[in-house]
Amino acid sequence: MFWQRSNYFMVLNTAIAVGFFSVVPSPLAPLLALLGFFACISWALVTFGSKYWQSRWEEAARRLEADCCPKAKLFAASKDEVHEEVEHSLNRGNHHGTQAWMDERILKKPSVSFQMSMLALFFIGFWVLAFAVSLCMAGHA
């Protein structure tokens, strides 16, 4: 669900950007920039809400696991245990070059939720800038 929502917002932003760059400079450009801005505000809020519910379900699963099958350690494993398991899995591939470099990045455990939220915030900044530029261009036209 998370990816479907984010894909929807990326497609929506792409469509708005195509429209924006097709009409700039024009009186419609600032309106499209505002539409993009509000779409990205919504996108950011959706990513924050998704992370909230993901955290809730992870915690509920951790408690359930502790009650019914504590040896599984799927959700209750420590960060060190998880890191060790991932490192072991990656090392089985005996990777070299680019793949080894990618494995190092993977072990840093980048947050998918954080990256998507940052992308939404970046687009908010983009649309603010696009709005300002479109107003300046409309003033010079």
Image (cartoon, rainbow, N blue to C red):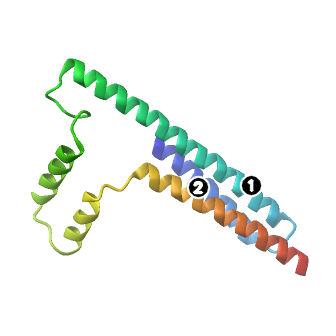
Q: Where residue 35 is drawn, which disc sits there?
A: 1
Whether residue 141 is visible to the viewer of this picture, yes or no, is no
Secondary element at tag 2: helix
Q: Quadrant of the C terminus?
A: bottom right
Using the image as rendered, state which of residue 24 and residue 42 is in the foreground: 42
- Other residues around mark 2 within 10 Å, as few (<14) / some (14–19) / many (≥20): few
Residue 35 to residue 4: above or below: below
Image height check: is 89 above or below 70?
below
Q: Quadrant of residue 134?
A: bottom right
Q: Is residue 30 left or right of residue 102?
A: right
Instruction: Count neighbours of disc 1 (C-alpha within 10 A) and say few if under 14, some if 14 to 19, many if 20 or more.
Output: some
Query: Which residue is at the front of the view, 32 or 60?
Result: 60
Residue 92's quadrant in the figure?
A: bottom left
Q: Secondary structure at mark 1?
A: helix
Side of 59 where 65 appears, left or right: left
Q: Residue at x 29, y 28 (%)?
A: 62
Residue topped by disc 2: 11
Cα distance in 3D space between marks 1 and 2: 14 Å
Percent x, y for residue 3?
A: 46, 46
Q: Which image quadrant for residue 14?
A: bottom right
Q: Position of residue 131 (x, y in %)?
A: 77, 66
Q: Residue furthest top?
A: 68
Give left or right: position of 73 versus 38.
left
Q: In the rendered view, tell whether residue 77 sits above or below residue 33.
A: above
Q: Amino acid at mark 1?
A: Leu
Q: Is residue 95 visible?
A: yes
The amino acid type, in three-letter code, at marker 2 is: Val
Q: Tell me what residue is drawn at x 22 percent, y 63 percent.
A: 103
The residue under the point 15% across, 72% down is: 96
Residue beneath the point at 10% across and 64% down: 94
Where residue 48 sits in the image (x, y, percent)? 53, 43
